Image (tube, rainbow, N blue to C red):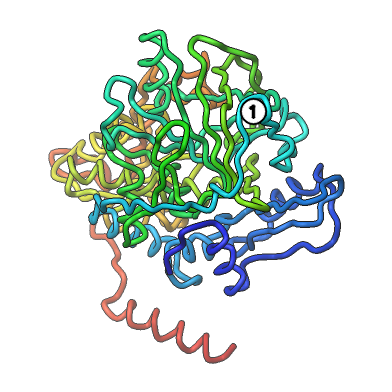
Amino acid sequence: MIFDDLRQFLQALDEHGQLLHVKDQVQAEPDLAAAANAAGRIGERAPALYFDNIAGFIDARVALNTLGSWPNHAIALGMAAGTSTKDQVAEFIRRWDAFPVTVERRENPPWRENSVEGEDINLFDILPLFRLNDGDGGFYLDKAAVVSRDPNDPDNFDKQNVGIYRMQVKGKRRLAIQPVPVHDIAIHLKAAEERGEDLPIAITLGNDPIITLMASTPLRYDQSEYEMAGALRQAPYPVATAPLTGFDVPWGSEVVIEGAIESRKRELEGPFGEFTGNYSGGHRMPVIRIDRVSYRTHPVFESLYLGMPWTEVDYLIGPATCVPLYKQLKADFPEVQAVNAMYTHGLLAIISTKKRYGGFAKAVGLRAMTTPHGLGYVKMAIVVDEDVDPFNLPQVMWALSTKVNPAGDLVQLPNMSVVALDPGSSPAGVTDKLVIDATTPVAPDTRGNYGLPVRDLPETSQWIDRLNQLMSRSR
């Protein structure tokens, strides 16, 4: 199934029993965030949550945890809800190869139903805002797709970025944004400020799941998120023209906010409970001036809880990190078999590979750290043999316990770049990185005494299917 907007996705989740309508009245704080936090603690089949009876709000609708489970992630891809994580990643990889798929330009987007401009804007009248963690410095928009263009090449569609960045509400028409240096919007902002200009942006809230996935995916600078979204949904992605900026924005958004990041202006932003499970502290960050807001009648406000993993952000970011890392590594090293970077935005990546010669696995781990995403995020790489499934943690632990000799299998790289949100970095944004070679040595590396490895019997795979069938019949 193809979803053009958030509401279609919510309906599909409902039809699959993966949308929980909370009908009792709740408090905006702490109930909304606490419920989403709880969803991440009740297992991998947790439903999305929908609230429309919130104390203190006359007319509010809030959707949380929409992508916060593997069944929900599968439904977003149009796959069976019971599809395994490994198979979802494999299908993601298969569809990736269809890139680019030209966008479909549509008129009359639903978010044109209402609009407000200039000093008449008051975000508090439009959005039911609430804090996500007790220590947060304010209200945040944390699941919005932000659209920006390269000021030095504004007509280049491929350099138009769609990314998810946290934004703190600073006033009725002001936001603070965190442009992480390795992300495209930071490149755009730097170029604009070098020209002495503001950076126009469009912020879209309440989007279909595919553009949310793509906005979370570390694509190359010149790869269009919209054209990759078309590949992932296997149909052209629908966009419309934002009235003030003229930017391409999702046709089906609930809310479109247009304005600009003001040149060389900074305000205190934070603290914020981050994906690492730590508060990120307060920092001086760029400021957004809001000039126009367009929105659907009775908009659905979508947000996500993040904190100590696992939360929705891990389901959202996990596969979207595995796939580009795999594709970038595979281009240089065809021997690479799979990449599991599900853990805390890819700060840890597990890579399975064949080997050409001794030391080859270490080269693969080092390359993972120099990919566009790995520069800021891959702090540790565990490299395993091709017969070890990186998505099977017991197998990975077996490889670590039997294949690693610290005398020669650990490569420590001092003073490397990492995302500043990594609480282990010191100073923030700088860390040592580590490659762990958990593969069997091959010539000319003759270390160890591995002898003849034990392999699964030829009939094992058939019996796996047979036993699963027998167990399903007995339930």
Residue 348 appears left or right of 280? left
Q: Is residue 310 among what the camera can see?
A: no
Residue 340 appears left or right of 122? left
Q: How many marks overall?
A: 1
Q: Is residue 242 above or below residue 340?
A: above
* Residue 208 screen position, x and y as percent: 49, 54
Q: Quadrant of the N terminus?
A: bottom left
- Residue farthest to the bottom, as pictured: 473
Residue located at (32% from left, 57% from top)? 236
Residue located at (57% from left, 12% from top)? 266
* Residue 459 screen position, x and y as percent: 29, 81
Amino acid type of disc 1?
Answer: Gln
Q: Is residue 352 among what the camera can see?
A: yes
Residue 445 appears left or right of 448? left
Q: Which residue is mark 1?
A: 168
* Residue 467 screen position, x and y as percent: 45, 84
* Residue 5 screen position, x and y as percent: 51, 57
Q: Using a 10 Å C-alpha cutoff, classify the residue at mark 1 as few (fewer than 14 neighbours), some (14 to 19) or many (20 or more).
A: many
Q: Is residue 176 above or below residue 61?
A: above
Q: Secondary structure at mark 1?
A: strand
Q: Is residue 267 above or below residue 36?
A: above
Q: Quadrant of the C terminus?
A: bottom right
Residue located at (60% from left, 50% from top)? 296
Residue located at (64% from left, 31% from top)? 278
